[in-house]
C-alpha cells in the first residue's frame, strides 16, 4: 500500500474545508490553514446587533445536490426549512410584484408582445443543455437574439447594469445561461417550483458543525494563520511559509486563494501561469447588512431596474427565514457588485451606510432611520470571477511546480458562484487529486481506519484520518 500523502490546504473557506474532508476520505493526511479568525471564507457568519447570521446572503435550493449531500453527511439536511418565496421588481419609481403569472401579466415594463418574447427566451435558455455554443457571445448578443432588442433594453439591460455594471458588455453569455439553468433545476427534476431553504442558525451552525467534524476526523483547521509564501524545495516537498515566520512542509499543497492572491503567494510559477492568474477579472462586493424593527415587504429578492439606485438588489432574509431566528426583527442585505478598484471601496462606513440606506428608503419610503437597529458592512474585492466572452478561462489546477495545486472559484467553468458549485468543485477535484498517489481507500471511515505510522520526513505521525461517513457529536 502506498503511504498516505501529507496535504496542506491554504484557505479555510468552504472550498478548502470540503477539499480537506474529501481528500481524507481517500486515506490522505490533511491540514487546513485559514488566514482569518473564523472558518468559512465568504460563507462565514458574524454578529449584527444581537443576531448571529451570515455575513453575505446565501440560499440553498432544493436541487443543490452537492451541498445537500454534504449537509446530509453532517446530519443537517433533515433540519433544513423550505419555503416558496416571492420576488419584487423596482422600476419606474415603483415596487412591483413579480412572483407569478398574474403579476407577470400586469407587469408594466413590457407590452404583451415583449412579455411573450421574454418568456420564450427564458424557456429556450433553460433548455440549452450545454453552453459551449455560446461561449463566444456576450450576454447582450445572446439575449438580444433570443428576446429582441426592445426586451433587452427594457428588461435585461437594467438588471445587468445592477449586477455587473458596464462590464456586462464583455461578459460571456454563459453567466446568464448558468443563472437561468440554476433557477430551473427543480423544474427539470419534476418539481413545479423551486424551493428555497435555510438551516436554522444559518451558516454559523453549518460551519461550526463542519469544523467539529473535521476535528473529529483528525483534520486540523488552524485559524489566524495567514500564509506569506508557498514554495517547492529542492530536497522535495512543498513548504508553506506563514506571516509569523513559521514554516510547514507537505508532500502536496493546494492554494484556494483567489487567482491574483494565489499568484502573489506562489512566486515560483512560470510567467505564463502568473499572467493567467492575474488576468482573471473579478468583481468584488460591498454588502450592507441591516437589522430592522419590522419587515419591509413580502419579497425575498427585489430586483433593481433603475440605474439611479446604487444597489444590485434588496435581499430581505426575513421573507424566507422565520423571524424568530432574528428575535422578531428583520434582516436585510443591500449588496453592490463592483470592480476591485471602484472608489466606493474607499468610502468610510458612515458614508457607505448613508448611501445604501438612502437608496433603500427610495424603494421603501416608509422606512425611517429609527427602524434601523444595527448596521454592518462587509467588503470583499475578489468575489466573482467574471467570464469574458471569447476568452478561454480554463485555468489548470496542477501547476508547473511539483506538488503545488491552485484551486478557486475561477475554476468553476460555467457558474453563478454559489455554495453548491463550490462544494461540487471541491468534491470533483478531490476525487482527481486523491488518486494521484492513492493509499488504500478508507471505505468505512471507522476507528479501525486510523492506524498511524511515523512520517517519512519529520517524525510526525501520518496515515489515514479517522473519518466517519456521518459526523456525530
Image (spheres, rainbow, N blue to C red):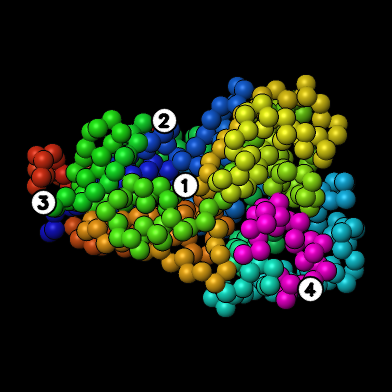
Mark 2, other Cα within 10 Å: few <14 / some 14–19 / many ≥20? few
Residue denoted by label 2 = 37
Q: Nearer the viewer, mark 2 or mark 4?
A: 4
| Circle 4: element type | loop
Residue at the image position 40 percent from the left and 59 percent from the top: 275
Residue denoted by label 4 = 148
Mark closest to the chain's N terminus, 2 or 1? 2
Percent of width and height locating residue 98: 80, 54
Residue denoted by label 3 = 235
Residue denoted by label 1 = 71
Mark 4, other Cα within 10 Å: few <14 / some 14–19 / many ≥20? some
Residue 197 appearing in the image: no
| Mark 2 in CB contact with mark 3 (< 8 angstroms) | no
Mark 1, other Cα within 10 Å: few <14 / some 14–19 / many ≥20? many
| Circle 3: element type | loop
Q: How far apart are the alpha carbons under marks 2 and 3?
A: 33 Å
Vertically, is 310 above or below 243?
Answer: below
Q: How far apart are the alpha carbons under marks 2 and 1?
A: 23 Å
Q: Which mark is residue 288?
A: none
Amino acid at each position: 500500500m502506498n503511504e498516505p500523502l501529507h496535504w496542506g490546504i491554504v484557505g479555510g473557506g468552504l472550498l478548502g474545508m470540503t477539499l480537506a474532508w474529501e481528500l481524507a476520505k481517500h486515506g490522505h493526511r490533511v491540514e487546513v490553514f485559514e488566514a482569518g479568525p473564523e472558518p468559512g471564507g465568504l460563507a462565514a457568519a458574524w454578529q449584527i446587533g444581537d443576531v448571529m447570521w451570515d455575513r453575505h446572503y446565501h440560499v440553498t435550493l432544493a436541487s443543490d445536490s452537492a451541498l445537500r449531500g454534504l449537509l446530509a453527511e453532517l446530519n443537517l439536511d433533515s433540519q433544513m426549512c423550505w419555503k416558496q418565496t416571492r420576488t419584487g421588481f423596482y422600476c419606474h419609481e415603483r415596487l412591483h410584484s413579480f412572483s407569478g403569472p398574474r403579476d407577470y401579466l400586469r407587469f408594466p415594463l413590457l407590452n404583451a408582445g415583449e412579455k411573450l418574447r421574454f418568456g420564450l427566451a427564458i424557456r429556450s435558455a433553460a433548455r440549452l443543455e450545454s453552453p459551449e455554443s455560446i461561449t463566444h457571445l456576450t450576454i447582450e448578443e445572446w439575449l438580444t437574439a433570443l428576446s429582441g432588442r426592445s426586451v433587452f433594453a427594457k428588461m435585461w439591460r437594467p438588471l445587468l447594469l445592477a449586477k455587473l455594471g458596464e462590464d456586462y458588455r464583455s461578459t460571456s453569455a454563459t453567466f446568464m445561461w448558468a443563472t437561468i439553468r440554476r433557477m430551473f433545476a427543480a423544474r427539470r427534476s419534476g418539481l413545479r417550483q423551486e424551493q428555497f431553504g435555510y438551516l436554522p442558525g444559518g451558516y454559523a451552525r453549518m460551519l461550526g458543525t463542519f469544523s467539529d467534524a473535521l476535528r473529529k476526523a483528525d483534520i486540523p483547521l488552524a485559524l489566524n494563520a495567514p500564509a506569506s509564501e508557498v514554495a517547492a524545495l529542492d530536497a522535495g516537498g512543498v513548504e508553506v511559509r506563514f506571516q509569523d515566520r513559521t514554516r510547514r512542509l507537505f508532500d502536496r499543497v493546494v492554494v484556494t486563494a483567489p487567482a491574483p492572491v494565489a499568484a502573489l503567494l506562489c512566486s515560483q510559477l512560470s510567467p505564463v501561469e502568473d499572467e493567467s492568474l492575474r488576468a482573471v477579472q473579478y468583481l468584488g462586493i460591498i454588502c450592507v447588512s441591516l437589522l430592522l424593527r419590522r419587515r419591509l415587504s413580502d419579497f425575498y429578492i427585489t430586483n433593481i431596474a433603475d440605474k439611479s439606485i446604487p444597489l444590485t438588489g434588496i435581499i430581505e432574509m426575513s421573507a424566507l427565514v422565520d423571524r424568530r431566528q432574528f428575535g422578531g426583527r428583520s434582516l436585510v442585505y443591500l449588496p453592490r457588485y463592483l470592480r476591485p478598484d471602484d472608489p466606493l471601496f474607499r468610502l468610510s462606513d458612515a458614508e457607505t451606510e448613508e448611501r445604501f440606506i438612502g437608496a433603500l428608503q427610495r424603494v421603501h419610503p416608509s422606512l425611517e432611520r429609527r427602524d434601523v437597529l444595527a448596521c454592518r458592512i462587509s467588503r470583499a474585492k475578489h468575489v466573482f470571477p467574471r467570464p469574458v466572452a471569447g476568452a478561454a478561462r480554463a485555468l489548470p489546477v496542477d501547476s508547473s511546480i511539483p506538488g503545488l495545486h491552485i484551486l478557486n472559484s475561477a475554476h468553476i467553468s460555467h457558474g453563478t458562484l454559489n455554495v453548491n458549485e463550490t462544494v461540487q468543485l471541491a468534491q470533483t477535484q478531490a476525487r482527481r487529486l486523491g488518486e494521484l498517489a492513492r493509499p488504500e481507500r478508507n471505505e468505512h471511515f471507522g476507528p479501525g481506519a486510523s492506524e498511524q505510522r511515523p512520517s517519512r520526513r519529520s517524525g510526525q505521525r501520518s496515515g489515514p484520518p479517522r473519518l466517519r461517513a456521518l459526523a456525530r457529536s
